[in-house]
Image (cartoon, helix red, strand yellow):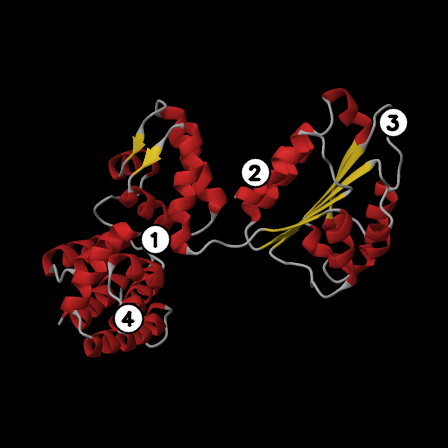
Amino acid sequence: MDEVKQLVTDIKKGNLKPIYFLMGEEPYYIDKISDFIEQHVLSEEEKGFNQMVLYGRDVTIDDIVANAKRYPMMAERQVVIVKEAQDLSRNIEKLVDYALNPQPTTVLVVNYKYKKLDKRKALYKAINKIGVVYESKKLYENQVGDWIRRVLSPKEYSITPKASQMLVEFLGTDLSKINNELEKLQIILPKGSQITPELIEENIGISKDYNNFELRKAIGNKDVVKAQQIVSYFGENPKANPMVVTVSLLFNFFAQLLHYHGLNDKSSRSVASALRINPYFVNEYITAARNYPMKKVSKVISTLREFDIKSKGVGANAVPQGDLLKELLVRIMG
């Protein structure tokens, strides 16, 4: 995020590079940087003749180079943006000749999503020498909560840890989806507001009481009644709560518990760092570890592997999801 801020600051100051190669598994920042260049480098009057957007599926490397070598019309520079450039991955190294001698009046932006250049090859080295190679890495689940807080803070909003966890659980680590939901909340909430589980339930439709986060907590606490209520709710709403997701999240939870049991230093800070979790949730893991000794955790992980296969229809084609979940719950908490 800091690297992106610096890039934007440089662009605002007019410190432009001839090539911006934006690559990596997380498309959110690739789009953000590319959109910023598209919107701010040229004036509205200059864009008509001097800004071009190409798509990887429709062009060749030669087409890109031909456009990049054009001279601007009645402007200091032109901007050429190549979106979905990953469709050119087989031939992307052919761009090296242009990268070795780029047109100084052109800003070439290449959006290379879900892939990255081989840093050992000539293209990466050439662009890195005269331009910008930005790699947008996928965040780990434990990093997304901090990202949400950092996105909200400059806009004068805050969020509770549970509300943040609900968004991550429901939307995964897709930053674009999370940002879209946050922007919807910012439209209806005044500045200075704190985003709570209740607001998320009311405005986004994620249940604050019946979700995988609460199920994990209930299982960890050995709260059989609460766990059964949640599982019953999932069984009645299978499309919104697919079993394969529930099993995957529980598997990750018990894998973390196994890791916890193996830690020598069980201080809160050490646990949060080792398990890559928000310190706010450390006590839940401490409680769960008391309720599930290492031997039991190993058995649960084995059970979850078994039910992962069943949740995908292998050996349990005629069994309703709700019944499978109830059986799984008995096996885990029994």
Residue 239: give its label.
1
Residue 71 occupies quadrant: top right
Residue 306: give its label.
none
The answer to whether one can see residue 211 in this image is no
Asked if the residues shown at circle 4 and circle 1 are in contact, with their CB atoms under 8 angstroms apart, the answer is no
* Dot 4 crowding, Cα within 10 Å, few <14, some 14–19, many 20+: some
Kindly state the secondary structure of the residue where label 2 is placed.
helix
Kindly state the secondary structure of the residue where label 3 is placed.
loop
The answer to whether one can see residue 221 in this image is yes
The residue wearing badge 2 is: 5
Q: Where is residue 310 in the image (x, y as percent from the top left)?
A: 33, 72
* Dot 2 crowding, Cα within 10 Å, few <14, some 14–19, many 20+: few
Query: CA–CA distance between discs 2 and 4?
Result: 37 Å
User: Which residue is at a point 20% across and 57% down the rendered structure image?
Assistant: 284
* Dot 3 crowding, Cα within 10 Å, few <14, some 14–19, many 20+: few
* Left or right: 238, with 59 as reference point: left
Q: In this picture, is 244 found above or below 62?
A: below
Q: What residue type is labelled 1?
A: Lys
* Left or right: 329, with 86 as reference point: left
The residue wearing badge 3 is: 73
Asked if the residues shown at circle 2 and circle 1 are in contact, with their CB atoms under 8 angstroms apart, the answer is no
Report the label total: 4
Residue 263: give its label.
4
The answer to which of marks 4 and 3 sits earlier in the sequence is 3
Q: Which amino acid does label 2 sit on?
A: Lys
